Amino acid sequence: MKKITKIESVTTQRKKKLRVAAYCRVSTASDEQLVSLETQKAHYEEYIASNPEWEFAGLYYDEGLSGTKKEKRPALMQMITDCENGKIDFIVTKSLSRFARNTTDCLELVRRLLKLHISIYFEKENLNTGSMETELFLSVMSSLAESESVSISENNKWGARHRFENGTFRLSYAPYGYSLTDGKLVINEDEAEQVRFIFNETLSGKSARQIATALNDKKVPSKRNGMWTSASVLNIMRNERYVGDCLYQKTYTDFRLRRHINRGEVDQFYEENHHDAIVSREVFDAVSKVINQEHKEKNRSEGNLKYQNRYAFSGKLLCGECGSVFKRRINITGKLKYPAWVCSVHHKDRTRCSMKYVRESVLETAFTTVMNKLIFGRKEVLQTLLDNLTTQSHKSRLRRIDEVERTLEEMQDRKRNLTSIMTKGYLDLAAFTRENNEITAETEKLMEERDQLKSEITGDLNRTESLRDIIKFTGKSAMLSSFDAELFERFVDHIAVVSRTELEFHLKCGMKVKEMVE
């Protein structure tokens, strides 16, 4: 008889390895930075291979590219595409600043990957996006990374100011009436004719509104092919470019990269006879007197805040699409009346901005919710941010200030020695003047750098002070049950209205918090 023995099957289910990719980036293509890139590549190959539960899924890197915008980094976008195609399960990267220096981009990419059930591990911050309960913590950390971009921006502004001073700044925008050719303003005769019309009509007694109406009736296109307004006409009347001069730094950006009209907060530079004039100085001065007289009669002044701060949100709501300020309106739906805020550009011309209005009650509820989240997550979120701001010390800036101070002392010694040598007859006057001018120029440059560094440190200290104020409040406050206008003014710099359902609160401490609303 046949004997059959059953052999029990033994199934050993192999655990599927996690396919891990790494992303790294350097800001420039210099030899030093490329060495850094090679070091990062070697690190991640070894780092991923050392984990038996991981499988190397590739190394993605960008070189010689800015980190401020995700679209400028092809390797990063390729990695995201590979994630969507199911080739990657997990991503490791050095830090938030290497991954994204723009908070909005960072949050967008993290959300996009989390929908695919793919997490990112940031080594420096020891942060795993897959284990976070909320996005508040990531908002804090990515805001810190974004502050590095602010530092880069300050360096760029410093370079621009030097070009303003020595007259080498190249314009990148031509006002109405001019075209830009090789960085120089050249008169556009068709538009220049309308500029002269505006100045002549003003001197004949016409108001800015009447002139704007006349231009629109003649179907004369404005600079962006839009409609003329009294504001656009007044801007032309006030613009010194039409007499051939240039006033540099009419606006400036603060440490949150928000642009402001310069009312004396930073230095300005005025260059006469920069380009060909469209109107004479006599005509320009006469029009200026007309404008000033009209303002006196109507008790108006530039930057008048008479109506800007009537409500808590006045001047603090910015359109995420066109950047304009929101204005308060009373909407009527049937028999229901309610206050709402609308983009000023959308209100005038819906073709120029599609942003819809937001109810005032929605804004109030959103702020209350944000504050309650901060109260609830005070230790994990606010204290973490404060620790990073305080430990993210100004050592490098302070060291550089110390170096500059020592160099300035050496410059003074050189100047004294130079004067001594000249008075003893060992150096002729021409050589003394040349050397003395070089020392003076270098001294001024160093002094400006020192002042800039001190200004940057002061900005960080202001943010830290504002953060301590929020921590103090949230530590003692119970959850808010209603909107508090005084708290809003105390803690919020402005709100960016991304859409009717998404608001981004920019706090005075430099932190950004997004809130989804209905």
Image (cartoon, rainbow, N blue to C red):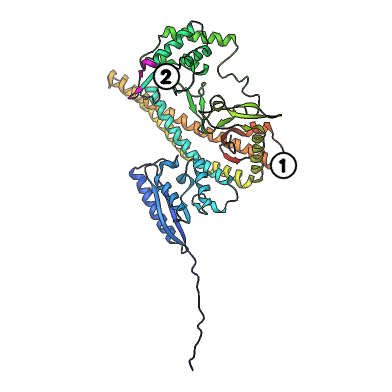
Residue 266's tag is: none
Q: Is residue 189 magenta?
A: yes
Q: Position of residue 175 (x, y in %)?
A: 42, 20
Q: Residue furthest front?
A: 334
Secondary element under disc 1, as helix, strand or loop, is loop
Q: Is residue 8 above or below residue 401?
A: below
Q: Residue furthest top?
A: 204
Which residue shows up at 72% across the image and 39% down it?
481
Q: Is residue 81 above or below residue 357?
A: below
Apparent side of residue 287 relative to residue 386 in the rendered image (left or right): left
The residue wearing badge 2 is: 176
Position of the C terminus by quadrant: top right
Q: Position of residue 136 (x, y in %)?
A: 59, 45
Magenta region: which residues?
A: 180-190
Foreground: 13 or 239?
Answer: 13
Q: Residue furthest bottom?
A: 1
Q: Position of residue 385 (x, y in %)?
A: 57, 43
Foreground: 44 or 447?
Answer: 44
The earlier-in-sequence mark between 1 and 2 is: 2
**Label 2: how many Cα within 10 Å (few below 14, some 14–19, many 20+):** some
Which residue shows up at 42% across the image and 13% down it?
194
Cα distance, mark 1 to mark 2? 55 Å
Residue 128 seen in the figure: no
Q: Position of residue 455 (x, y in %)?
A: 50, 31
Apparent side of residue 46 relative to residue 306 in the rendered image (left or right): left
Secondary element under disc 2, as helix, strand or loop, is loop
Count of numbered marks: 2
**Residue type highlighted by circle 1:** Ala
Q: Is residue 152 magenta?
A: no
Residue 478's tag is: 1
**Residue type highlighted by circle 2:** Tyr
Apparent side of residue 389 relative to residue 412 in the rendered image (left or right): right
